[in-house]
Image (cartoon, rainbow, N blue to C red):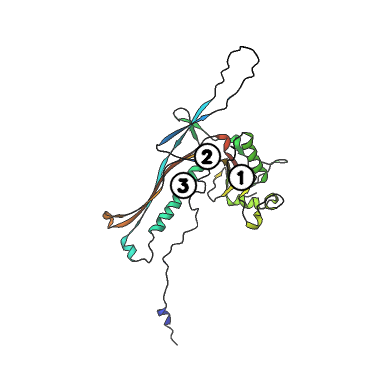
Amino acid sequence: MSYSVDTAFVNSYHGQLDYIFQQRGSKLRGTLREVTQNSEYDFWDRLGTATVNAITTRHGDTPHNEIDHSRRRNHVIGYDTNEYFDNQDKLRMILDPKSGYAEAQAFALGRKMYDIIISGLLGTSYSGKEGDTAVTYDTAYRIAVDYVESGVATNSNLTIGKLRRAMYLLESNDAIMDGERVTLAAHPSQKQALLRTTEVTSADYNGVKALVNGEVNTFLGFNFIWTTRATSSGGYRQALAYPASAGLLGVAENINVRIDELPTKRYSYQVYSTATFGATRMWEEKVIQILCDEAA
């Protein structure tokens, strides 16, 4: 019997890369109005409501009812990332990771776009003729972490009552245009909270068999997007509800990937990715922030 046979054992390797768990791109692209922006700053004019007068006299003066004009400024910024792949490394590897590098970089730029959309919706917007007037998020459209429809206020995660309140705030301001999609972006913790709710999981309330499928995609007029990049405010996770017209995503350059040989680096490969974009809130009334206590 040979006790050294293990020296003849072989190892097998594969020419494939598996990606570490991550959000692969921007889950929110497509939920806002998207435009091509060919300038650092772009201005979008807004028009207020008109009013009318009753005609109570003959030959009276023609009324003048001014309609308010305002504008919002959108600012785009370039983002990039880079990785080198040495030609000597290629000689020592079974796989060629260049395409994997490019895809991982595209994922990262997509995540940056997600973050920019969130900060654009909740952060400071800029108004005025020159776009130099700061407009902070209006907390009148924030649903408190302890909001309840009736009874004693108490902290909660995402609830049916909070969803109803969010839709009410949008509808009571005529903030949803006919046929417009309303997005609700939230963390998987909020999904689990809803899955513990009878109205979501029962076929008597919901046509989607959420409990069977483990999914909540649409409910109460919302299209849900579940993301681990949902941010926090004051120690509480925040979900966002908004129609597509709530904000604007300006894209000057879509995600662009280049793979080049570098003669000055002994012909190593450079995998370079870049994109230029920016987002802003167009209307305060159309962005509803819902604070959720994940410990409740």
What is the x, y in percent for residue 226? Answer: 57, 50
Residue 188 shows in the view: yes
Query: Which label number is shown at residue 121?
Result: 2
Look at mark 3 in the image and give the residue it sits on: 112
**Amino acid at the residue labelled 2:** Leu
- Which of the 4 quarters of the picture holds residue 88? bottom left
**Amino acid at the residue labelled 3:** Lys
Residue shown at 48%/51% (left/top)?
Answer: 25
Residue shown at 45%/51% (left/top)?
Answer: 108
Look at mark 1 in the image and give the residue it sits on: 222
What is the x, y in percent for residue 36? Answer: 43, 40
Q: Residue furthest top?
A: 59
Query: Which label number is shown at residue 40?
Result: none
Determine the CA span between mark 2 and mark 3: 14 Å
Few, some or many residues within 10 Å of mark 2 (<14, 14–19, 20+): many
Q: Residue furthest front?
A: 58
Residue 138 shows in the view: no
| Quadrant where the N terminus is found in the figure | bottom left
- Which of the 4 quarters of the picture holds residue 40? top left
What is the x, y in percent for residue 150? Answer: 72, 40
What is the x, y in percent for residue 265? Answer: 28, 55
Residue shown at 65%/58% (left/top)?
Answer: 212
Q: Which type of secondary structure does the marked residue at label 3 adopt?
A: helix
- The disc, 2 or 1, on the residue closer to the chain's N-terminal end is 2
**Amino acid at the residue labelled 1:** Phe
Q: Which type of secondary structure does the marked residue at label 1 adopt?
A: strand
Determine the CA span between mark 2 and mark 1: 17 Å
Residue shown at 50%/42% (left/top)?
Answer: 117
- The disc, 3 or 1, on the residue closer to the chain's N-terminal end is 3
The residue nearer to you, when weighing 202 against 91, is 202
- Rendered view: 190 above or below 285: below
- The disc, 2 or 3, on the residue closer to the chain's N-terminal end is 3
